[in-house]
Image: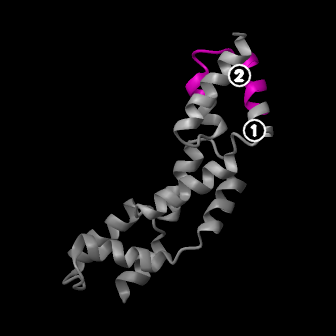
Amino acid sequence: MSPDQTVEAAVVRLLAGREHSRAELRRKLSGRFASTELEPVLDDLAERGLQSDRRFAEAYAAMRQSRGYGPLAIRAELKQRGVDAALIASALDALDPDWLAQMRGLSERKFGADPPADRKQMARRGRFLAQRGFPADLIHQLLRD
């Protein structure tokens, strides 16, 4: 087996489990392979459509959104995983969810359907939603309703 096949096999094995960004693959395999070996294989797999940062960003954003995370958290996580800002924006635009309805459902599951009784409860709900990555203007809009 040639070194190129070994690098390709390692990359394909990682991609078989789930989508990865190019930066994730580079980080995970940089200890085992030199970048001169790794980069051409990553280029080839991207060209053949086996690895796509766009596909990764869209799948990751959809998964995190379905688990109750907001656009700020999703954006930060994708950036941390080495995805380009334009691809992140595209992935978030592709979601097109009703963030306010998602926040309302998340808040009701966590705190019940009753409105906050006082400022302390309102602040607690606001902090929870902010930690989940929702923008402050949407949080204020939800808590005012």
Q: Name the image quarter holding residue 131.
A: bottom left
Q: Name the image quarter holding residue 38.
A: top right
Along the line of sight, the residue nearer the viewer: 110 or 58: 58
Residue lying farthest left? 117
Q: Is residue 30 magenta?
A: yes
Q: Earlier in the sequence, mark 2 or mark 1?
A: 2
* Image x and y of residue 135, in percent: 48, 69
Assign a secondary structure to mark 1.
helix
* Image x and y of residue 132, in percent: 40, 61
Kindly identify which numbered label has been placed on residue 13: none
Residue lying farthest bottom? 145
Kindly identify which numbered label has been placed on residue 38: 2
Amino acid bearing label 1 = Ala
Along the line of sight, the residue nearer the viewer: 20 or 142: 20
Give the residues drawn in magenta, as a range: 27-43
Q: Quadrant of the N terminus?
A: top right
Q: Name the image quarter holding residue 19.
A: top right
Residue found 66% across the figure and 16% down from its top: 6
Residue found 57% across the figure and 29% down from its top: 13
In the picture provided, is 3 more to the left or to the right than 104?
A: right
Assign a secondary structure to mark 2.
helix
Q: Is residue 13 magenta?
A: no
Kindly identify which numbered label has been placed on residue 46: 1
Amino acid bearing label 2 = Leu
* Image x and y of residue 97, in percent: 54, 74
In the picture provided, is 89 more to the left or to the right than 105?
A: right
Crowd rating for badge 1 (residues with CA inside 10 Å; few <14, some 14–19, many 20+): some
